[in-house]
Image (cartoon, rainbow, N blue to C red):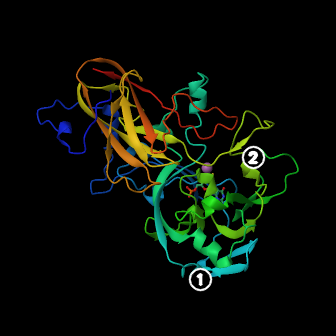
Amino acid sequence: MATRQDDVIPDFLRMDDAIGSDPANANKTGNWHGWPTKDLNPVTLMDDEGRTVRIRTPVMDLEGLITPTDLHYTVQHFDVPPVVATDQWELKIHGQVKNELTLNFDQLRRFPGRSVRTVMECSGSDATFFEYFKDEGPKPSRTQECMILSASEWTGVPLAAVLNAAGLSDKSLYVRAVGNDEGVPAIAAEGTKPFYYDKGLPMQKALHPDTILAWAQNGQLLEHLHGSPVRLLVPGWSGNWSVKWITDLEILDHMPECWYHYEFYYYGNSPEDPNKELITTLGVKAIVTQPNDDTEEMTKGVHMIRGYAWSGAGAISEVDVSTDGGETWHSAHIEAPRHDRFMWVRWSYRWDADKAGKFTIMSRASDEVGRVQSREPRYNNMRKNFSAIVGYPVTVK
Ligand SMILES: Nc1nc2c(c(=O)[nH]1)N[C@H]1C(S)=C(S)[C@@H](COP(=O)(O)O)O[C@H]1N2
Ligand SMILES: [Mo]
């Protein structure tokens, strides 16, 4: 039976405890400039003109729930498209609708707004763990490499409001969202013509009130790298559904053949697999951020093991922690707030490491629809959506 750590505190707090230290995290709190500014180090990549085009998030070093916008990861498959000023931007809604519409930025902002706090995870996050689990690669370091994982508060209007304004019929079954970035994927078959990044969202998800057309992130108008002036945001689904730099919503009576559907973001054993599955909902996943995954040694005493947990399918109902490689599990405390359905939660577990020796720290999430984080990854040809439990070996001295 797992022991529960209660919301009501004090089991965590015993003033006479020997507090253990963990050198890896201690190093991370150095680096002050002397005044209240602290460097965090996202891993970035710049283009030829010195502009940042890629950001990987230092998840292990963050506090709270919101990833500061300048640390929020960015992914795009093609070159970053040119900046479009808000007064030049238009969104066309066409196809299987009663009235085709073209909205400019001001018109879009006349719909009642909505803010959604959500975790965003790229399908490629943690991909190198697939090799590690097969003993074909070294243990990845989420601390060193940073992650394709972040969370923000996004503000915009429900996509449903815009679709309803255009008028839906029983032939309005999919929403093809198109971005303003054009290219040919590196792995595409020879002769593939350049196309704009697009995804075909099923109507049920499109009409979910938290699926929004967003123009702001964390209280500010969108940064260009995050899809300004307006992007689609599909909470709970893998990041690739949240089409940036959106220009078109094409309403269809069938699923469009978007290249990224079955050539890139799919479950399957090979490109020829006849039973490919589209990747949509995120897994159920808890990760340990403290001690971070570069920690090898800790001293005897009380340690707070902390992390994040999230699920694309439902709220997190339970997080368990093991320090013996999954032999025994203990219920962790889930920290408030936990009411934002698509947001990750913080959790913590008080570990009384009173014996020296070798330990393996693990965390395991469960969600309200009954999914439990698995020990084995779901292998797939494209190495997408890794969500298995990872063990961190540490020595207590
Ligand atoms: N137009 C466009 N939208 C896109 C992409 C893209 O290549 N082009 N990449 C997707 C992927 S794979 C991810 S994980 C998210 C990342 O969003 P972010 O850069 O704001 O974090 O954007 C998605 N939206
Ligand atoms: Mo992604």
21 sits to left or right of 369: left
Which quarter of the rendered picture does the N terminus lie within? top left
The three-letter amino acid code for the residue at tag 2 is Tyr
Q: Quadrant of residue 327?
A: top left
Classify 10 Å Cα crowding around label 2: few (below 14), some (14-19), many (20 and above). Answer: some
Q: Secondary structure at mark 1?
A: helix
Q: Residue at x 88, y 50 (%)?
A: 191
Which quarter of the rendered picture does the C terminus lie within? top left
Q: Residue at x 41, y 22 (%)?
A: 325
Q: Which is nearer the eye, 278 or 317?
A: 317
For disc 2, the marked residue is 262
Residue farthest to the front? 170
233 sits to left or right of 14: right
Residue 63 in percent (x, y) is at: 35, 50
19 sits to left or right of 233: left
The three-letter amino acid code for the residue at tag 1 is Gln
Q: Quadrant of residue 349?
A: top left
Residue farthest to the right? 191
Q: Which mark is residue 107?
A: 1
Residue 92, compared with residue 151, is above or below; it is: below
Residue farthest to the top? 357
Looking at marks 1 and 2 on the same chain, the residue that comes earlier in the sequence is marked by: 1
